[in-house]
Image: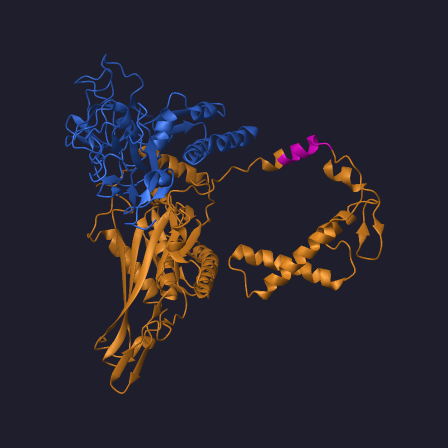
Chain colours: A blue, B orange
Amino acid sequence: MAAGRGVAAEACVGQVVLPGDVLLLPAHPDEDGERLRLGAGAAPRGRLLCGPGLRRCAAGLLVTKCGLLRHRQAGGGAAAGGAYWVDSQQKRVGARRDYVGGGGEPPSCPRLTDLFVHEPRLQYVPVKGDHVIGIVTAKAGDVFKLDVGGSEQASLSYLAFEGATKRNRPNVQVGDLIYGQFLVANKDMEPEMVCIDSSGRSSGMGIIGQDGFLFKVSLGLIRKLLAPKCEIIQELSQLYPFELVLGMNGRIWVKAKTVQQTLIIVNILEACEYMTAEQRKQAFAKLSGN
Amino acid sequence: MKATPLSNCERRFLLRAIEERKRLDGRQCYDYRNVRVSFGADYGCCIVELGKTRVLAQVSCELVPPKPNRPTEGILFFNLELSPMAAPGFEPGRQSELLVKLNRLIERCLRNSKCIDTESLCVVAGEKVWQIRLDLHLLNHDGNIIDAASIAGIVALCHFRRPDVSVQGEEVTVYTPEERDPVPLSIHHMPICVSFAFFQQGTYLLVDPSEREECVMDGLLVIAMNKHREICTIQSSGGIMLVKDQVLRCSKITAVKVAEITELIQKALENDQKVRKEGGKFGFAESIPNQKITAFKMESAAVDTNNVEEQAEEIITKAEPPSDVFAKPILHTPGTAQIGEGIENSWGDLEESEREEAVEEEGESEATAFECQKMETEDTSTMRETKKDEPIVLSDSEEEEVVILEPQELPKKTR
């Protein structure tokens, strides 16, 4: 795929594209000389969005990330519409969100924006309402500073625990793990976490016990595990009892009866990302056999 | 950006796991992670992967005036860089304590061990010598940077070719690769670093610590050694007291590991040399047209094999013994036998094609990959067997086994 030559975008769907590749879009018979309009420039034949990893150029789309090219048809049966994006596993990116949509204004179609947010990445960007696992890095006055894997540390008030008062402070040490929820997560602002819900109950949040093990997986895997119809956790629970906390920031805390059992869970969950459902079933069958 | 802090529960769990002689990735205490060496399109460029740790090395050269106190010696320059690409905790362009320590260790490992013949880099004494520059870039950090960097460094130096020069009177001519083949550096030996992490004041020892293990270790011992079992550098950090026995044991382990790694490096270098000569695809370029993803793949997971033996035995006991009993083999001549009557023998044809293959393969100089070499040796051995006893119908070693297997023995084995 030589740069500059250009390949038809449809031909590359599902294949690896590299930065610098040019993807040609299907030509429109009635729009000969005019440049293609993408994104917010709503064309009558359905609009086309270019998602993360793609940029417009004179010839069509310019690839800016390496990964697999993905495409989704827009609703309404428009031939040229839909969305193209690059499904990449970029390990470290800056603190900004990916540029979603082709035009200047945000795309109005919510389904397409959803789709880009589900791009697997390792860098977490705080989102309001997300449940995450944070590591306490400092105790500053009446707030704790938590590392949540984002670009900035989150703050957590000591009053944001169930039953906490000015006199009854929660016992939190530096290095402890806290499972909480984002209350404030705005761009260019320090995110703020709480460990209570709107009615003042902990509802499972709070300090995580001293035992067990914390490890990190990709954000894509976490979303897969937290999906309502996820079979992985159900299959795992048939092996032996264990405790599990999944944070949307890619952190998983797991505790089983012994070190060996914990390690097995850790390795299975890490391997799940690269296994098909069938391979996974085989692996589980092997484990439950002995 | 700050590095991710280590939580208390991770620390506690890791230490407990180490006490139970368990490691996160299923390795044993003395196991090294998989080492993979791949070369770039140019000479002197390579990527070494040690598990998930990746180091890119590039060697370059330049003609410079020598240092006044050493007019007949070439100049060596080593530089290791840690970029934020490797781990978010590394800052670009900052001389952190770790970076200084690693650079110093690389220098001691490669320069002070005198593995490169600097005198051969002299072109005109006192006027022109080669300056060899080795740049190491950490691409991903998953612990044990020093081992990966030392392997990458020595591999790149071995792989490097400098332009040929000739001196006629005062005139120095540097030849392009088209005019004259570039010449390799003269390397006396290959020092390789092996790291040992100590826990609980030296009670527990782990070879090739991963990033998490490095976070909780008490002390680190790095031994650089070549395959002749000569220690080139030894450094202990972290301020722990080591007993004499521990150090001796470490040096013994180092000798084993270094021998393995040196063999791997030599195989990789030979392989690359051959592919280059044949004009095939080599280097990183080979992964592009196949559209193969080279990063973020899962290594084969370590599976707990504790109860495998019992399980296998259980299966054997449950399984029925093979139903059909072999008819008595008919011995035609010593070395040949026939089982069953009137069945057409298809083994002979197979043997023919195999023999052809074996002959063809022997015609070639050597197989490319290591696996191929293994296969080849097997093939040639069967061929030799066939030549030994010419007029045979069945001559595979497997066949002989079947003949030896008496029908009475079968149930005994399965029980």
What x and y, as percent, mark residue B205? 42, 48
Q: Which quadrant holds residue B102?
A: bottom left
Residue B89, position in %: x, y? 25, 44
Q: Is residue A222 magenta?
A: no
> Could you tell whether A264 is left or right of A250 in the image?
right
Q: Residue at x 56, y 59 (%)?
A: B373
User: Is residue B161 in view?
Assistant: yes
Q: Is residue A63 left or right of residue B233?
A: left
Q: Is residue A148 visible?
A: no
Magenta segment boundaries in residue numbering = B312-320
- Picture coordinates of residue B207 (x, y %)? 42, 50
Q: In front: A129, or A47?
A: A47
Task: Kindly report the secondary structure that dominates the magenta region of the rendered protein.
Answer: helix
Q: How many marks?
A: 0
- Left or right relative to B381: residue A185: left
Indicate whether residue B314 is drawn in magenta.
yes
Residue ID at (33%, 58%) = B57
Nearest the viewer among B296 and A285 is B296
Pick the front one: B211 or B215: B211
**Quarter occupied by residue B194:** bottom left
Residue A54 x/y as whole percent: 26, 39
Quadrant assignment for the C terminus of chain A: top right
Q: Residue at x 38, y 30 (%)?
A: A212
Left or right position of A261 against A89 = right
Q: Residue furthest bottom?
A: B169
Q: A256 or B313, which is in the foreground?
A: B313
Give the answer, above or below, for where B101 lies relative to A225. below
